[in-house]
Amino acid sequence: MYIARTMRETMPQTPIFPSMLGSSCSGQVQPDMGERDADLVYQDGSLVSGSLEALIERLVPTVDYYPDRTYIFTFLLSSRVFIHPSELLAKVGQICVQQKQQLETGTEAEKAKLKSFAAKIIQLLKEWTETFPYDFQDERARKELKEIAHRITQCDEENGTVKKSISQMTQNLHLTLSMRNQYQEIREKIRQPVPDKGTILKNKPPSTQKDILSVCSDPLVLAQQLTHIELERLGNIYAEDLMQIVSHMDSLENHKCRSDVTKTYNLEAYDNWFNCLSMLVATEICKVVKKKQRTRVVEFFIDVARECFNIGNFNSMMAIISGMNLSPVARLKKTWSKVKTAKFDVLEHHMDPSSNFCNYRTALQGATQRSQSANSSREKIVIPIFNLFIKDIFFLHKIHSNRLPNEQINFKKYWEISRQIHDFLTWKEVECPFEKDKKIQSYLLTAPIYTEEALYLASFENEGPENHMEKDSWKTLRTTLLNRA
């Protein structure tokens, strides 16, 4: 693979998102500000807007030019809001053909540059297929890729190095797509609907029910296993998944039907995991009959949440706190009166939603800085609260227009969105340093979880209703669940 090595050594590989990209993003940049380059507008050396055609031209390499990696990532990520990946590939192919023809009909010196030009096109396609492989799940995109590859192969028919590089790139792409499809199939098979817990409450004696403390009594170990599960699920979320939400939202707002929008399965699976963990925490607390033992379970989960915070696993921490704040748990006043709540108060302070979760964002920034200077995998772990991360992307998308008044694409907006998504991609690539415990993980993923109705019923049975409204709810729930069982 000499040609691939040569390309990596000779082509500009600027670090993604250099320091010039700040945390602010404004859609108010006027097109007459800064330097102008045809249909591209720059401000302080940064590209802030441009027409779609000009942005596509900037993506395609020439004999003397290769786009910055930051630009490649940002444009390929954001372009799907304006053009389908297969259509973009077709336009890239057209530009490549035009450049190839110009070189072939030029001087002998220009003809000699054909191989160098081919190498750059392959490098672009390689970055595209590796960074956004799901773009090629579409048959039209694969067809366009094959067509470009065929054209570029003609630039080096003598020794076949270009053909070998393209063959390797195609094999890697097929392998990636195959693995992603297999993962989804496996998840579909093991994903089961939450069963009704009326039967469990009616027929199964509490003494025979397995509980979390019998599986794992060490808060740190449980926090580590939760981190394993989080990173596994994060590993199957891709930049296309995140940006697809934005492009799909635009389609709905414009009353268009995007039949090509793939179901964001991995995002839904991760969101479901958060909800299941919250409900598991509530179930483990509410199903315990004895108050002393129930208090111990509450304090155990507080310690687990604190360990998650120390690790940098904010998503599990938030899920645990959410579970303990569910009404069936929160109403257990006699239980909470026995709990040492000082540590829980600290955790809730970190997750305080006031000022747009300012305390959490400060903690996240600290974890990010620790990760950037880390010497070990343990220090690299950053798992954000996923729902907040998604809301931030939504917020950026909503408050800044896609296009400026002159119809140019507001590229400054997409610099910031892609910066945040790239941070996420960096976090999800961290290899979990903790030893995997299959027994604990199996319990976390498969232990029975009460429905909301069953949680309320268990809560009332542990600590009786305190007013007429609760008494009526208790009677109704008990009748409904037991009859359903």
Image (cartoon, rainbow, N blue to C red):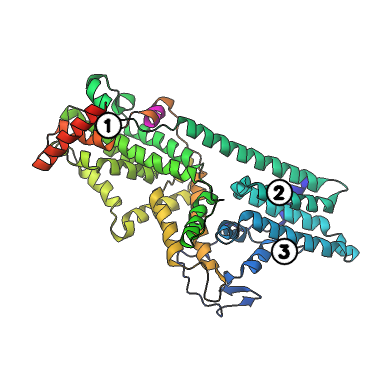
Is disc 1 surrounded by few (<14), some (14 to 19) or many (20+) residues within 10 Å? Answer: many
Amino acid type at circle 2 is Lys
Disc sitting over residue 268 in the figure = none
Q: How far apart are the two marked residues, 2 and 1, measured between alpha carbons?
A: 52 Å
Whichever of callouts 2 and 1 sits on the residue coming sooner in the sequence is: 2
Tell me the residue that label 3 is attached to: 65
Residue linked to disc 1: 284
- Residue in view at x 65 percent, y 48 percent: 129
Residue drawn at point x = 21 percent, y = 44 percent: 342
Residue lying at 51% horizontally and 42% vertically, measured from the top left: 235
Q: Nearer the viewer, mark 3 or mark 1?
A: 1
Using the numbered discs, state the Cα–Cα distance from disc 3 to disc 1 in whole angstroms.
60 Å
Q: Give the range drawn in magenta.
A: 440-445
Decide whether residue 444 is among the magenta residues: yes
Pair 2/3: label in front? 2
Disc assigned to residue 143: 2
